[in-house]
Image (cartoon, coloured by chain):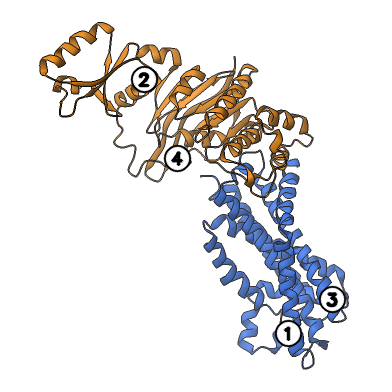
Chain colours: A blue, B orange
Amino acid sequence: MTGFRTLLYKEVLRFWKVGFQTVGAPVLTALLYLLIFSHVLDRHVQVHGVRYTAFLIPGLVMMSLLQNAFANSSSSLIQSKITGSVVFVLLPPISYLEFFLAYVVAAVLRGLMVGVGVLLVTGWFAPLDFVAPFWILAFALLGGGILGAFGVIAGIWADKFDQLAAFQNFLILPLTMLSGVFYSLHSLPAFWQRLSHFNPVFYMIDGFRYGFFGVSDVAPENSLAVVAACFLAISAISLAMLRSGYKLRS
Amino acid sequence: MGVAVSIDRVEKRFGPLRALDGVSLEIAEGEFFGLLGPNGAGKTTLISCLAGLARPDAGRLSVLGRDVVGDYRAARRLLGVVPQELVFDPFFSVRETLRIQSGYFGLRHNDDWIDEILANLDLTAKADANMRRLSGGMKRRVLVAQALVHRPPVIVLDEPTAGVDVELRQGLWQFVQRLNREGHTIILTTHYLEEAETLCGRIAMLKQGRVVALDSTHNLLARFSGHTLSLRLAPGAQLPAALRARAGERGGFWQLRLSGLDEVEPLLAGLRAEGCAIDDLRLAQADLEDVFLGVMQDAPEMPDASGGPPAGRGR
Protein backbone atom coordinates (compact mmCIF):
# COMPACT_ATOMS: atom_id res chain seq x y z
CA MET A 1 0.00 0.00 0.00
CA THR A 2 3.02 2.34 -0.10
CA GLY A 3 2.01 3.39 -3.61
CA PHE A 4 -1.42 4.45 -2.35
CA ARG A 5 0.02 6.23 0.69
CA THR A 6 2.54 8.13 -1.38
CA LEU A 7 -0.02 9.17 -3.97
CA LEU A 8 -2.36 10.30 -1.18
CA TYR A 9 0.50 12.22 0.47
CA LYS A 10 1.39 13.83 -2.86
CA GLU A 11 -2.22 14.84 -3.49
CA VAL A 12 -2.58 16.36 -0.01
CA LEU A 13 0.77 18.14 -0.28
CA ARG A 14 -0.29 19.49 -3.67
CA PHE A 15 -3.32 21.36 -2.34
CA TRP A 16 -1.69 22.19 0.98
CA LYS A 17 1.19 23.99 -0.74
CA VAL A 18 -1.34 26.35 -2.30
CA GLY A 19 -3.60 26.30 0.75
CA PHE A 20 -4.32 30.00 0.58
CA GLN A 21 -6.10 29.37 -2.69
CA THR A 22 -7.46 25.86 -2.07
CA VAL A 23 -8.63 26.24 1.54
CA GLY A 24 -8.46 29.93 2.44
CA ALA A 25 -10.37 31.28 -0.56
CA PRO A 26 -13.45 29.04 -0.28
CA VAL A 27 -13.64 29.76 3.47
CA LEU A 28 -13.71 33.48 2.71
CA THR A 29 -16.37 33.01 0.02
CA ALA A 30 -18.60 31.14 2.46
CA LEU A 31 -18.08 33.82 5.08
CA LEU A 32 -19.20 36.49 2.59
CA TYR A 33 -22.35 34.51 1.77
CA LEU A 34 -23.11 34.27 5.45
CA LEU A 35 -22.53 37.97 6.15
CA ILE A 36 -24.78 39.08 3.30
CA PHE A 37 -27.62 36.62 3.71
CA SER A 38 -27.77 36.78 7.50
CA HIS A 39 -27.71 40.58 7.37
CA VAL A 40 -30.67 40.61 4.99
CA LEU A 41 -32.69 37.69 6.31
CA ASP A 42 -31.85 36.83 9.90
CA ARG A 43 -34.48 39.09 11.47
CA HIS A 44 -37.25 38.01 9.09
CA VAL A 45 -36.80 34.31 8.49
CA GLN A 46 -36.90 31.16 10.54
CA VAL A 47 -36.61 27.71 9.02
CA HIS A 48 -37.72 24.56 10.87
CA GLY A 49 -37.98 26.84 13.91
CA VAL A 50 -34.29 27.70 13.63
CA ARG A 51 -32.85 31.21 13.12
CA TYR A 52 -31.95 31.76 9.47
CA THR A 53 -28.23 32.32 10.16
CA ALA A 54 -28.03 29.08 12.13
CA PHE A 55 -29.95 27.28 9.39
CA LEU A 56 -27.60 28.64 6.75
CA ILE A 57 -24.29 27.70 8.41
CA PRO A 58 -24.43 23.88 7.99
CA GLY A 59 -25.58 24.37 4.39
CA LEU A 60 -22.63 26.62 3.63
CA VAL A 61 -20.25 24.21 5.34
CA MET A 62 -21.50 21.28 3.28
CA MET A 63 -21.68 23.24 0.02
CA SER A 64 -18.06 24.34 0.41
CA LEU A 65 -17.00 20.85 1.37
CA LEU A 66 -18.65 19.34 -1.70
CA GLN A 67 -17.43 21.95 -4.19
CA ASN A 68 -13.86 21.68 -2.96
CA ALA A 69 -13.84 17.90 -2.94
CA PHE A 70 -14.84 18.02 -6.60
CA ALA A 71 -12.33 20.75 -7.39
CA ASN A 72 -9.47 18.84 -5.81
CA SER A 73 -9.54 15.59 -7.74
CA SER A 74 -10.72 17.14 -11.00
CA SER A 75 -8.20 19.96 -11.13
CA SER A 76 -5.31 17.79 -10.00
CA LEU A 77 -6.04 15.27 -12.74
CA ILE A 78 -6.56 17.77 -15.54
CA GLN A 79 -3.42 19.67 -14.57
CA SER A 80 -1.27 16.58 -14.56
CA LYS A 81 -2.84 15.44 -17.83
CA ILE A 82 -2.22 18.76 -19.54
CA THR A 83 1.32 19.17 -18.23
CA GLY A 84 2.03 15.49 -18.93
CA SER A 85 3.18 14.80 -15.38
CA VAL A 86 0.42 12.20 -15.05
CA VAL A 87 3.00 9.85 -16.57
CA PHE A 88 4.75 9.75 -13.17
CA VAL A 89 1.75 7.99 -11.63
CA LEU A 90 1.09 5.82 -14.68
CA LEU A 91 4.58 4.32 -14.88
CA PRO A 92 4.79 2.92 -11.30
CA PRO A 93 3.08 -0.27 -10.14
CA ILE A 94 0.00 1.51 -8.73
CA SER A 95 -3.29 -0.33 -9.21
CA TYR A 96 -6.38 1.47 -10.45
CA LEU A 97 -8.00 0.90 -7.06
CA GLU A 98 -5.10 2.56 -5.22
CA PHE A 99 -5.22 5.39 -7.75
CA PHE A 100 -8.96 5.89 -7.14
CA LEU A 101 -8.68 5.74 -3.36
CA ALA A 102 -5.77 8.18 -3.21
CA TYR A 103 -7.54 10.82 -5.29
CA VAL A 104 -10.88 10.40 -3.50
CA VAL A 105 -9.43 10.39 0.02
CA ALA A 106 -7.35 13.49 -0.78
CA ALA A 107 -10.50 15.17 -2.14
CA VAL A 108 -12.42 14.30 1.04
CA LEU A 109 -9.59 15.65 3.18
CA ARG A 110 -9.55 18.94 1.30
CA GLY A 111 -13.36 19.09 1.57
CA LEU A 112 -13.19 18.43 5.31
CA MET A 113 -10.51 21.07 5.82
CA VAL A 114 -12.57 23.65 3.99
CA GLY A 115 -15.70 22.51 5.82
CA VAL A 116 -14.06 22.83 9.24
CA GLY A 117 -12.61 26.19 8.18
CA VAL A 118 -16.05 27.47 7.19
CA LEU A 119 -17.52 26.17 10.44
CA LEU A 120 -14.81 27.91 12.47
CA VAL A 121 -15.33 31.33 10.89
CA THR A 122 -19.14 31.20 10.64
CA GLY A 123 -19.94 29.36 13.87
CA TRP A 124 -19.64 32.61 15.83
CA PHE A 125 -22.65 34.16 14.16
CA ALA A 126 -25.34 31.87 15.54
CA PRO A 127 -25.67 29.21 18.20
CA LEU A 128 -25.22 25.74 16.69
CA ASP A 129 -26.26 22.42 18.15
CA PHE A 130 -24.58 19.18 17.28
CA VAL A 131 -27.58 16.96 17.92
CA ALA A 132 -26.34 13.92 15.99
CA PRO A 133 -22.62 14.05 15.24
CA PHE A 134 -22.68 10.64 13.58
CA TRP A 135 -24.98 11.96 10.87
CA ILE A 136 -22.79 15.02 10.40
CA LEU A 137 -19.72 12.87 9.89
CA ALA A 138 -21.46 10.25 7.72
CA PHE A 139 -22.87 12.83 5.30
CA ALA A 140 -19.63 14.82 5.22
CA LEU A 141 -17.58 11.73 4.35
CA LEU A 142 -20.03 10.26 1.85
CA GLY A 143 -20.78 13.62 0.22
CA GLY A 144 -17.08 14.42 -0.09
CA GLY A 145 -16.49 10.93 -1.45
CA ILE A 146 -19.20 11.33 -4.10
CA LEU A 147 -17.90 14.68 -5.31
CA GLY A 148 -14.29 13.47 -5.11
CA ALA A 149 -15.11 10.43 -7.24
CA PHE A 150 -17.12 12.63 -9.60
CA GLY A 151 -14.09 14.89 -9.86
CA VAL A 152 -12.00 11.88 -10.90
CA ILE A 153 -14.51 11.19 -13.69
CA ALA A 154 -14.56 14.83 -14.82
CA GLY A 155 -10.77 15.17 -14.61
CA ILE A 156 -10.21 12.08 -16.72
CA TRP A 157 -12.91 12.94 -19.24
CA ALA A 158 -11.99 16.60 -19.79
CA ASP A 159 -9.17 17.31 -22.22
CA LYS A 160 -9.06 21.04 -21.64
CA PHE A 161 -9.50 23.41 -18.72
CA ASP A 162 -12.62 25.01 -20.25
CA GLN A 163 -14.32 21.61 -20.49
CA LEU A 164 -13.71 21.13 -16.80
CA ALA A 165 -14.86 24.68 -16.07
CA ALA A 166 -18.10 23.91 -17.92
CA PHE A 167 -18.57 20.85 -15.73
CA GLN A 168 -18.02 22.96 -12.66
CA ASN A 169 -20.11 25.99 -13.67
CA PHE A 170 -23.04 24.27 -15.38
CA LEU A 171 -23.40 21.16 -13.26
CA ILE A 172 -21.69 21.27 -9.88
CA LEU A 173 -22.50 24.90 -9.08
CA PRO A 174 -26.25 24.74 -9.92
CA LEU A 175 -26.63 21.36 -8.20
CA THR A 176 -25.05 22.65 -5.01
CA MET A 177 -26.65 26.12 -5.04
CA LEU A 178 -30.13 24.68 -5.72
CA SER A 179 -29.89 21.95 -3.13
CA GLY A 180 -31.46 23.72 -0.19
CA VAL A 181 -28.34 25.39 1.17
CA PHE A 182 -30.14 28.73 1.34
CA TYR A 183 -33.73 27.60 1.86
CA SER A 184 -35.91 24.75 3.01
CA LEU A 185 -37.46 22.78 0.20
CA HIS A 186 -40.86 23.25 1.82
CA SER A 187 -40.74 26.92 0.93
CA LEU A 188 -40.65 26.06 -2.81
CA PRO A 189 -43.65 25.64 -5.15
CA ALA A 190 -44.69 21.99 -5.52
CA PHE A 191 -43.08 21.52 -8.94
CA TRP A 192 -39.65 22.73 -7.78
CA GLN A 193 -39.96 20.68 -4.64
CA ARG A 194 -40.51 17.54 -6.70
CA LEU A 195 -37.65 18.45 -9.05
CA SER A 196 -35.31 19.07 -6.15
CA HIS A 197 -35.81 15.50 -5.02
CA PHE A 198 -33.90 14.40 -8.12
CA ASN A 199 -30.88 16.41 -7.00
CA PRO A 200 -28.62 14.12 -4.98
CA VAL A 201 -26.88 17.11 -3.39
CA PHE A 202 -30.18 18.01 -1.70
CA TYR A 203 -30.00 14.77 0.33
CA MET A 204 -26.39 15.46 1.31
CA ILE A 205 -27.22 18.95 2.58
CA ASP A 206 -30.47 17.90 4.23
CA GLY A 207 -28.94 14.93 6.03
CA PHE A 208 -25.90 16.95 7.07
CA ARG A 209 -28.10 19.68 8.51
CA TYR A 210 -30.17 17.08 10.38
CA GLY A 211 -27.02 16.27 12.35
CA PHE A 212 -26.98 19.84 13.70
CA PHE A 213 -30.65 20.53 14.45
CA GLY A 214 -32.40 17.17 14.40
CA VAL A 215 -34.88 18.48 11.85
CA SER A 216 -34.87 18.01 8.08
CA ASP A 217 -37.03 17.99 4.96
CA VAL A 218 -36.53 14.25 4.47
CA ALA A 219 -35.92 11.52 7.07
CA PRO A 220 -32.11 11.22 7.46
CA GLU A 221 -32.21 7.44 6.98
CA ASN A 222 -33.71 7.98 3.52
CA SER A 223 -31.16 10.63 2.68
CA LEU A 224 -28.34 8.36 3.81
CA ALA A 225 -29.66 5.56 1.60
CA VAL A 226 -29.80 7.88 -1.43
CA VAL A 227 -26.33 9.28 -0.73
CA ALA A 228 -24.78 5.85 -0.16
CA ALA A 229 -26.32 4.56 -3.39
CA CYS A 230 -24.95 7.59 -5.26
CA PHE A 231 -21.51 7.00 -3.80
CA LEU A 232 -21.51 3.38 -4.93
CA ALA A 233 -22.75 4.26 -8.42
CA ILE A 234 -20.28 7.12 -9.00
CA SER A 235 -17.42 5.05 -7.59
CA ALA A 236 -18.30 2.13 -9.85
CA ILE A 237 -18.26 4.39 -12.93
CA SER A 238 -15.03 6.03 -11.88
CA LEU A 239 -13.35 2.69 -11.18
CA ALA A 240 -14.52 1.28 -14.49
CA MET A 241 -12.97 4.28 -16.29
CA LEU A 242 -9.68 3.86 -14.45
CA ARG A 243 -9.64 0.13 -15.00
CA SER A 244 -10.14 0.50 -18.75
CA GLY A 245 -7.42 3.15 -18.90
CA TYR A 246 -9.89 5.52 -20.58
CA LYS A 247 -8.02 8.63 -21.76
CA LEU A 248 -5.09 7.79 -19.49
CA ARG A 249 -3.57 4.76 -21.19
CA SER A 250 -3.99 4.78 -24.97
CA MET B 1 22.55 -13.89 -20.39
CA GLY B 2 18.80 -13.92 -19.91
CA VAL B 3 16.27 -11.99 -21.88
CA ALA B 4 15.71 -8.47 -20.52
CA VAL B 5 12.92 -7.44 -22.85
CA SER B 6 10.85 -9.64 -25.09
CA ILE B 7 8.53 -8.11 -27.67
CA ASP B 8 6.49 -10.64 -29.55
CA ARG B 9 4.41 -9.77 -32.62
CA VAL B 10 3.10 -6.57 -31.09
CA GLU B 11 0.44 -4.65 -32.98
CA LYS B 12 -1.06 -1.30 -32.10
CA ARG B 13 -3.54 0.72 -34.11
CA PHE B 14 -4.70 4.28 -33.67
CA GLY B 15 -7.85 4.37 -35.79
CA PRO B 16 -6.78 3.55 -39.34
CA LEU B 17 -3.09 4.02 -38.52
CA ARG B 18 -1.02 0.95 -37.77
CA ALA B 19 1.50 2.41 -35.37
CA LEU B 20 3.01 -1.00 -34.68
CA ASP B 21 2.60 -3.68 -37.30
CA GLY B 22 3.86 -6.93 -35.82
CA VAL B 23 7.04 -5.89 -34.02
CA SER B 24 9.18 -8.67 -32.55
CA LEU B 25 12.43 -8.04 -30.70
CA GLU B 26 14.47 -9.66 -28.00
CA ILE B 27 16.91 -7.64 -25.96
CA ALA B 28 19.38 -9.50 -23.79
CA GLU B 29 20.30 -8.56 -20.23
CA GLY B 30 23.19 -6.13 -20.13
CA GLU B 31 22.74 -4.89 -23.71
CA PHE B 32 22.96 -1.27 -24.78
CA PHE B 33 20.27 -1.34 -27.42
CA GLY B 34 19.32 1.37 -29.88
CA LEU B 35 15.87 1.91 -31.33
CA LEU B 36 16.02 4.15 -34.38
CA GLY B 37 13.53 5.34 -36.92
CA PRO B 38 12.05 8.48 -38.41
CA ASN B 39 9.29 10.37 -36.62
CA GLY B 40 6.13 8.31 -36.59
CA ALA B 41 7.98 5.01 -37.05
CA GLY B 42 6.48 3.69 -33.79
CA LYS B 43 9.43 3.97 -31.39
CA THR B 44 7.58 5.86 -28.69
CA THR B 45 4.45 3.73 -29.17
CA LEU B 46 6.58 0.63 -28.65
CA ILE B 47 8.07 2.09 -25.48
CA SER B 48 4.60 3.11 -24.30
CA CYS B 49 3.39 -0.47 -24.75
CA LEU B 50 6.40 -1.75 -22.81
CA ALA B 51 5.78 0.73 -19.99
CA GLY B 52 2.03 0.13 -19.80
CA LEU B 53 1.17 3.63 -21.03
CA ALA B 54 -0.45 2.10 -24.10
CA ARG B 55 -2.13 -1.24 -24.50
CA PRO B 56 -1.18 -3.35 -27.51
CA ASP B 57 -3.99 -4.67 -29.73
CA ALA B 58 -2.11 -7.91 -30.23
CA GLY B 59 1.12 -9.57 -29.14
CA ARG B 60 2.93 -9.77 -25.84
CA LEU B 61 5.66 -7.81 -24.12
CA SER B 62 7.63 -8.79 -21.07
CA VAL B 63 10.39 -7.36 -18.92
CA LEU B 64 12.73 -10.00 -17.46
CA GLY B 65 10.02 -12.57 -18.05
CA ARG B 66 7.24 -10.56 -16.41
CA ASP B 67 4.30 -9.85 -18.70
CA VAL B 68 3.63 -6.10 -18.85
CA VAL B 69 -0.15 -6.61 -18.76
CA GLY B 70 -0.73 -9.76 -16.72
CA ASP B 71 2.05 -9.13 -14.20
CA TYR B 72 2.21 -5.36 -14.54
CA ARG B 73 3.34 -4.65 -10.98
CA ALA B 74 6.46 -6.79 -11.27
CA ALA B 75 7.16 -5.63 -14.84
CA ARG B 76 6.95 -1.94 -13.91
CA ARG B 77 9.29 -2.40 -10.94
CA LEU B 78 11.88 -3.80 -13.30
CA LEU B 79 11.59 -0.94 -15.76
CA GLY B 80 12.70 2.69 -15.56
CA VAL B 81 11.47 5.01 -18.29
CA VAL B 82 12.75 8.47 -19.13
CA PRO B 83 9.88 9.96 -21.12
CA GLN B 84 10.48 12.00 -24.23
CA GLU B 85 8.44 15.04 -23.24
CA LEU B 86 9.99 17.42 -20.75
CA VAL B 87 7.37 17.01 -18.02
CA PHE B 88 7.49 17.93 -14.36
CA ASP B 89 5.21 18.52 -11.41
CA PRO B 90 5.44 22.25 -10.60
CA PHE B 91 4.37 21.84 -6.98
CA PHE B 92 7.47 20.11 -5.70
CA SER B 93 11.20 20.48 -5.19
CA VAL B 94 13.68 18.09 -6.82
CA ARG B 95 14.11 16.06 -3.64
CA GLU B 96 10.36 15.91 -2.98
CA THR B 97 9.83 14.77 -6.56
CA LEU B 98 12.33 11.94 -6.12
CA ARG B 99 11.00 10.91 -2.71
CA ILE B 100 7.46 10.79 -4.07
CA GLN B 101 8.56 8.80 -7.08
CA SER B 102 10.34 6.34 -4.74
CA GLY B 103 7.16 5.98 -2.71
CA TYR B 104 5.17 5.09 -5.83
CA PHE B 105 7.50 2.14 -6.21
CA GLY B 106 7.06 1.12 -2.59
CA LEU B 107 10.37 2.55 -1.35
CA ARG B 108 10.10 4.62 1.80
CA HIS B 109 13.66 5.27 2.94
CA ASN B 110 15.51 5.88 -0.26
CA ASP B 111 17.52 9.01 0.55
CA ASP B 112 20.96 7.42 0.25
CA TRP B 113 20.28 6.30 -3.28
CA ILE B 114 18.55 9.61 -4.12
CA ASP B 115 21.67 11.46 -2.94
CA GLU B 116 23.84 9.25 -5.10
CA ILE B 117 21.70 9.84 -8.19
CA LEU B 118 21.65 13.58 -7.51
CA ALA B 119 25.43 13.64 -7.24
CA ASN B 120 25.89 11.62 -10.41
CA LEU B 121 23.58 13.87 -12.37
CA ASP B 122 25.17 16.98 -10.91
CA LEU B 123 21.90 17.98 -9.24
CA THR B 124 22.99 18.11 -5.59
CA ALA B 125 23.03 21.91 -5.52
CA LYS B 126 19.48 21.99 -6.91
CA ALA B 127 18.03 19.35 -4.57
CA ASP B 128 15.80 21.80 -2.73
CA ALA B 129 14.94 24.03 -5.69
CA ASN B 130 11.39 23.98 -6.99
CA MET B 131 11.03 22.18 -10.32
CA ARG B 132 9.70 25.35 -11.93
CA ARG B 133 13.00 27.14 -11.27
CA LEU B 134 15.14 24.63 -13.15
CA SER B 135 16.43 25.10 -16.69
CA GLY B 136 15.34 22.69 -19.42
CA GLY B 137 18.55 20.70 -19.13
CA MET B 138 18.17 20.41 -15.36
CA LYS B 139 14.57 19.25 -15.72
CA ARG B 140 15.77 16.62 -18.16
CA ARG B 141 18.26 15.37 -15.55
CA VAL B 142 15.49 15.14 -12.95
CA LEU B 143 13.50 13.02 -15.41
CA VAL B 144 16.47 10.68 -15.64
CA ALA B 145 16.76 10.63 -11.84
CA GLN B 146 13.04 9.83 -11.51
CA ALA B 147 13.45 6.84 -13.80
CA LEU B 148 16.27 5.52 -11.61
CA VAL B 149 14.85 5.89 -8.08
CA HIS B 150 13.80 2.25 -7.89
CA ARG B 151 17.10 0.92 -9.35
CA PRO B 152 15.44 -0.69 -12.34
CA PRO B 153 17.50 -3.38 -14.10
CA VAL B 154 16.08 -2.24 -17.45
CA ILE B 155 16.24 1.45 -18.34
CA VAL B 156 14.52 3.03 -21.33
CA LEU B 157 15.62 6.46 -22.49
CA ASP B 158 13.30 8.00 -25.06
CA GLU B 159 15.24 10.79 -26.79
CA PRO B 160 16.94 11.85 -23.56
CA THR B 161 19.29 14.34 -25.16
CA ALA B 162 16.79 16.28 -27.26
CA GLY B 163 17.49 19.95 -26.58
CA VAL B 164 20.26 19.23 -24.10
CA ASP B 165 23.61 21.01 -24.22
CA VAL B 166 26.82 19.20 -25.10
CA GLU B 167 28.24 19.20 -21.60
CA LEU B 168 25.17 17.59 -20.06
CA ARG B 169 24.96 15.13 -22.91
CA GLN B 170 28.50 13.94 -22.20
CA GLY B 171 27.83 13.71 -18.48
CA LEU B 172 24.59 11.86 -19.02
CA TRP B 173 26.21 9.32 -21.34
CA GLN B 174 29.05 8.68 -18.91
CA PHE B 175 26.50 7.96 -16.20
CA VAL B 176 24.36 5.75 -18.42
CA GLN B 177 27.42 3.86 -19.65
CA ARG B 178 28.42 3.26 -16.05
CA LEU B 179 24.95 1.90 -15.29
CA ASN B 180 25.30 -0.36 -18.33
CA ARG B 181 28.69 -1.62 -17.12
CA GLU B 182 27.14 -2.34 -13.75
CA GLY B 183 24.68 -4.66 -15.47
CA HIS B 184 21.69 -2.49 -16.33
CA THR B 185 20.12 -3.09 -19.69
CA ILE B 186 19.76 0.18 -21.61
CA ILE B 187 17.30 0.85 -24.41
CA LEU B 188 17.80 4.14 -26.18
CA THR B 189 15.92 6.00 -28.84
CA THR B 190 17.61 9.01 -30.28
CA HIS B 191 17.72 11.22 -33.31
CA TYR B 192 21.44 11.71 -32.88
CA LEU B 193 22.79 8.80 -34.87
CA GLU B 194 26.32 9.56 -33.75
CA GLU B 195 25.22 8.83 -30.19
CA ALA B 196 23.65 5.55 -31.20
CA GLU B 197 26.76 4.58 -33.15
CA THR B 198 29.07 5.26 -30.19
CA LEU B 199 26.87 3.82 -27.45
CA CYS B 200 24.72 1.00 -28.77
CA GLY B 201 25.96 -2.53 -29.24
CA ARG B 202 22.89 -3.50 -31.23
CA ILE B 203 20.34 -1.51 -33.14
CA ALA B 204 16.83 -2.00 -34.45
CA MET B 205 15.48 0.33 -37.09
CA LEU B 206 11.76 0.89 -37.33
CA LYS B 207 9.79 2.18 -40.27
CA GLN B 208 6.02 2.50 -40.37
CA GLY B 209 5.63 0.23 -37.36
CA ARG B 210 7.88 -2.56 -38.65
CA VAL B 211 11.42 -3.62 -37.84
CA VAL B 212 13.35 -3.08 -41.07
CA ALA B 213 16.84 -3.72 -39.70
CA LEU B 214 18.09 -5.51 -36.60
CA ASP B 215 21.75 -6.23 -36.13
CA SER B 216 24.82 -5.33 -34.16
CA THR B 217 26.05 -1.82 -34.81
CA HIS B 218 29.27 -3.32 -36.14
CA ASN B 219 27.45 -5.47 -38.70
CA LEU B 220 25.15 -2.66 -39.76
CA LEU B 221 28.14 -0.44 -40.45
CA ALA B 222 29.90 -3.28 -42.25
CA ARG B 223 26.88 -3.78 -44.47
CA PHE B 224 27.38 -0.29 -45.73
CA SER B 225 31.13 -0.44 -45.66
CA GLY B 226 32.89 1.69 -48.14
CA HIS B 227 32.76 5.38 -48.57
CA THR B 228 30.45 8.18 -49.44
CA LEU B 229 31.43 10.82 -51.95
CA SER B 230 29.65 14.13 -51.42
CA LEU B 231 29.63 16.64 -54.27
CA ARG B 232 28.40 20.18 -54.49
CA LEU B 233 28.06 21.18 -58.09
CA ALA B 234 28.77 24.63 -59.46
CA PRO B 235 25.66 26.74 -60.03
CA GLY B 236 23.93 25.63 -63.20
CA ALA B 237 25.73 22.29 -63.41
CA GLN B 238 23.58 19.17 -63.69
CA LEU B 239 24.45 15.77 -62.34
CA PRO B 240 24.41 13.25 -65.22
CA ALA B 241 21.26 11.12 -65.21
CA ALA B 242 23.17 7.86 -64.67
CA LEU B 243 24.62 9.18 -61.41
CA ARG B 244 21.48 10.95 -60.34
CA ALA B 245 19.69 7.60 -60.17
CA ARG B 246 22.05 6.31 -57.44
CA ALA B 247 22.66 9.59 -55.63
CA GLY B 248 20.86 11.03 -52.65
CA GLU B 249 20.78 14.69 -51.78
CA ARG B 250 21.51 16.03 -48.33
CA GLY B 251 22.29 19.61 -47.34
CA GLY B 252 23.03 20.79 -50.89
CA PHE B 253 25.39 17.89 -51.53
CA TRP B 254 24.82 14.97 -53.87
CA GLN B 255 25.89 11.83 -52.05
CA LEU B 256 27.15 8.76 -53.82
CA ARG B 257 27.81 5.51 -52.04
CA LEU B 258 31.02 3.91 -53.29
CA SER B 259 31.92 0.27 -52.99
CA GLY B 260 35.62 1.14 -53.05
CA LEU B 261 38.01 4.04 -53.40
CA ASP B 262 38.94 2.91 -56.93
CA GLU B 263 35.56 4.19 -58.04
CA VAL B 264 36.50 7.79 -57.32
CA GLU B 265 38.78 8.47 -60.25
CA PRO B 266 36.56 7.15 -63.09
CA LEU B 267 33.62 8.92 -61.51
CA LEU B 268 35.36 12.27 -61.48
CA ALA B 269 36.68 11.66 -64.98
CA GLY B 270 33.12 11.00 -66.13
CA LEU B 271 31.96 14.28 -64.60
CA ARG B 272 34.78 16.17 -66.28
CA ALA B 273 33.87 14.59 -69.62
CA GLU B 274 30.28 15.79 -69.16
CA GLY B 275 31.55 19.31 -68.39
CA CYS B 276 30.11 19.16 -64.88
CA ALA B 277 31.94 21.65 -62.64
CA ILE B 278 32.34 20.87 -58.95
CA ASP B 279 32.33 23.48 -56.18
CA ASP B 280 33.10 21.25 -53.24
CA LEU B 281 33.94 17.62 -52.68
CA ARG B 282 34.11 15.44 -49.58
CA LEU B 283 35.01 11.83 -49.11
CA ALA B 284 33.83 10.15 -45.92
CA GLN B 285 33.62 6.70 -44.45
CA ALA B 286 30.08 5.38 -44.09
CA ASP B 287 28.56 6.17 -40.71
CA LEU B 288 25.33 5.18 -39.09
CA GLU B 289 23.55 8.04 -40.79
CA ASP B 290 24.35 6.51 -44.18
CA VAL B 291 23.23 3.13 -42.95
CA PHE B 292 20.02 4.65 -41.64
CA LEU B 293 19.26 6.47 -44.87
CA GLY B 294 20.13 3.38 -46.88
CA VAL B 295 17.88 1.14 -44.81
CA MET B 296 15.02 3.62 -44.91
CA GLN B 297 15.32 3.96 -48.70
CA ASP B 298 15.57 0.23 -49.31
CA ALA B 299 12.76 -0.82 -46.96
CA PRO B 300 9.53 -1.26 -48.86
CA GLU B 301 6.83 1.36 -48.37
CA MET B 302 3.68 -0.04 -46.83
CA PRO B 303 0.92 1.78 -48.65
CA ASP B 304 -1.72 0.06 -46.54
CA ALA B 305 0.04 0.76 -43.27
CA SER B 306 -1.30 4.22 -42.91
CA GLY B 307 -4.62 5.64 -43.90
CA GLY B 308 -4.09 8.80 -41.92
CA PRO B 309 -1.37 11.26 -41.07
CA PRO B 310 1.91 9.94 -39.72
CA ALA B 311 1.92 9.21 -36.02
CA GLY B 312 2.93 12.20 -33.96
CA ARG B 313 5.82 12.05 -31.60
CA GLY B 314 5.09 11.34 -28.00
CA ARG B 315 2.14 8.99 -28.36
Residue underneath mark 4: B313
Q: Is residue B277 left or right of residue B161?
A: left
What residue lies at 46% left-to-right and 15% top-to-bottom? B216
Q: Residue A123's mark?
A: 3
Give the Cα separation between the discs numbered 1 and 2: 77 Å
Residue underneath mark 1: A37
Q: Secondary structure at mark 2?
A: helix
Q: Earlier in the sequence, mark 3 or mark 1?
A: 1
Binning the other alpha carbons within 10 Å of mark 4 as few (below 14), some (14 to 19) or many (20 upward) gives some
Q: Give the answer, above or below, for where A6 lies relative to B284.
A: below
Pointer 2 chain: B
Q: Give the answer, above or below, for where A102 lies relative to B192.
A: below
Do tags 1 and 4 sit on the same chain? Answer: no
Q: Give the answer, above or below, for where A149 lies relative to B293.
A: below
CB under 8 Å between callouts 1 and 2? Answer: no
What residue lies at 81% left-to-right and 67% top-to-bottom? A116
Q: Amino acid at mark 3?
A: Gly
Q: Amino acid at mark 1?
A: Phe
Asked whether A131 or B43 is in front, the reply is B43
Pointer 1 chain: A
Pinpoint residue A62: horizontal percent, then vertical percent. Answer: 74, 71
| Residue B174 shows in this picture | yes
Residue A249 appears in which quarter of the rendering? top right
Give the Cα separation between the discs numbered 3 and 2: 76 Å
Pointer 3 chain: A
Q: Amino acid at mark 2?
A: Val
Outermost residue, left direction?
A: B274
